[in-house]
Image (cartoon, grey):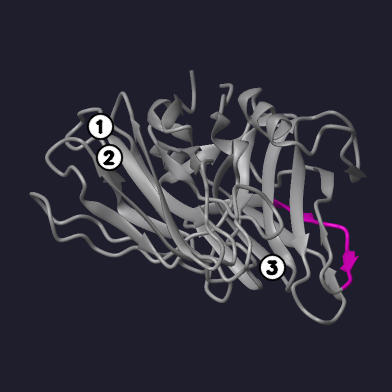
Amino acid sequence: MTRRGALATVVLLVGACSGAPATMGPDPLPEGKPVDARPPDNTVGGFRADLPEAVLMPGAETTPCWILPLDVSGPSRFVGGAHLTVGKGLHHGNIVARKKSGDGVRRCGPGESSSAELALDVVNGGAVLFASTTQISGEEWQRFPTGMAFALDPDLEIVARMHYLNAGTQPLTIAPKYEWFTVDAAAVTTELAPFAWDFYDIDIPPLGEATARGQCFFDGPMHVVTIMPHMHRMGIGAAAGFLGGPRDGQRWFDSPGYDPESGLIRQFEPALDLGQDSVGRGVWFSCTWQNQLDKRLSYGLGDDEMCTMFGYAYPPSYAYSGFVRNGACAVIPARP
């Protein structure tokens, strides 16, 4: 079965935080909790990717792109979790699978490191493999609830589009190591797909505070299993809530937005139902920044900022992505 993942991967990535239980609404909502730091239940195999070392001098920033083999051990191609080990310097990494184009470890070719190519990789039968908290150092885990996983087509390779930043005063050697865990196919009851909600119209005044808020309506019940906001170092808060329906406006996710000391992926078990009793509704999401620089910031790399919410949801046909620009949301389903 071909996986036609969403353009949800256009913006990966990457960052997020502590979910807080909501008290409004007809019934209590599930609380977003940290992911368990262990392999998923029913693990039967897996695969890994050890990225080549990169040395960065103080203040340096680079965006290397690598292609690596995807060699799965064991009988299953359903991924139930993953693990990242890395030292300081990883701003974020967009790790996807795509149709195999060659052999061995090699640099990406011209144009292959772009966001547009990243989205096409997933749409054309690939998958989103991992997105990490901004500037995370140490370990970060991804572990779906028992019975949940995303599937991999055969004949894939890994593409690692990385963003490294040395914000310290000493040289850094950066060498991220990723490991994925496949689970027994017979134990999978719910197939997941990725989503991303991204806000482009960022305008933060010099030495000032600003909040950006986007909203998107969806045409079907979307169940959020994990979420992770991506903001940069000026971020002081991220949130998401219901749009429309009996819970209109109610917040179901609250995060500091930027916290490299604590992995910020949050998981809902049971899943958070955006459909509100199977009715197609929507989501609002927001980011707040405190600009410590004497210049205006917008959407981008370097000193600039981002406001992205990334995660996994089900069913795949309702794992909607939304990209907000000029006040309007372009909504894209995960699988046509």
Question: In this orientation, does residue 205 appear?
Answer: yes
| Amino acid found under the numbered disc labelled 1 | Arg
* 28 w.r.t. 37: above or below: above
Q: Which residue is mark 1?
A: 281
Residue 144 visible within the image:
no
For the magenta stretch, what is the residue range?
47-57
Category of crowding for the residue at label 2, using alpha-carbon neighbours closer than 10 angstroms: few (below 14), some (14–19), many (at least 20): many
- Left or right: 240 in relation to 4: left
Say which residue appears at 20% left-offset and 55% top-offset. Answer: 29
Residue on which the image places disc 3: 85
From the top left corner, tell me how far across and down residue 52 is, in percent: 88, 58
Please name the residue shown 71% across and 44% down the image.
72
Question: Is label 1 in contact with label 2 (beta carbons under 8 Å)?
Answer: yes
- Asked if residue 142 lies left or right of residue 116, the reply is left
Q: Where is mark 2, residue-wise?
A: 274
Between marks 3 and 1 in the image, the one whose residue lies nearer the viewer: 1
Q: Residue furthest top?
A: 336
Give the amino acid at mark 2: Leu
Identify the residue shown where x is 84% and y is 65%. Answer: 60
